Amino acid sequence: MSDKNSVLENLSLMRVDLTRLADRMDRMSVEMRATRQHVAGLVALQDHDHVEITQIKLRLDRIERQLNLTD
């Protein structure tokens, strides 16, 4: 009977550990989702900045041509 109790105790401890692990995984999932959303926002901002810089370069090139400042 002692062996059976020992096995049941170990299984009970394993269940507690698995529950903790599942809770931790849930928290990590939420944190990862937030991180992915943040990175997506940064990428979108970078893309916007790239477009804006390209437009500024084109405008500057046009101004330089009008002023005959091109090489």
Image (cartoon, helix red, strand yellow):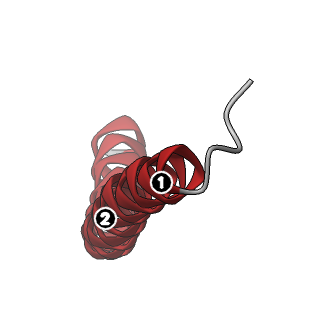
Q: In the image, 18: left or right of 35?
A: left
Q: Nearer the viewer, residue 67 or 53?
A: 67
Q: Nearer the viewer, residue 48 or 44?
A: 48
Q: Which mark is residue 18?
A: none
Q: Nearer the viewer, residue 50 or 71?
A: 71
Q: Quadrant of the C terminus?
A: top right
Q: Return the x and y of residue 3 as percentages of the image width and height.
A: 39, 36
Does the image show residue 9? no
Question: Tag 2's secondary structure?
Answer: helix
Please determine whether, in this image, residue 61 is positioned above or below residue 30: above
Q: Nearer the viewer, residue 58 or 47?
A: 58
Residue at screen point 25% across, 67% down: 33
Of the numbered discs 1 and 2, the one sitting upstream in the chain is 2
Q: Nearer the viewer, mark 1 or mark 2?
A: 1
Q: Return the x and y of residue 65 as percentages of the image width and height.
A: 51, 44
Residue at screen point 34% across, 41% down: 7
Indicate the amino acid at tag 2. Answer: His
Indicate the amino acid at tag 1. Answer: Gln
State the CA–CA distance, disc 1 to disc 2. Answer: 27 Å
CB contact under 8 Å: marks 1 and 2 = no
Q: Residues within 10 Å of mark 2 (few under 14, many from 20)?
A: few
Q: Which mark is residue 66?
A: 1
Q: Residues within 10 Å of mark 1 (few under 14, many from 20)?
A: few
Q: Which mark is residue 48?
A: 2
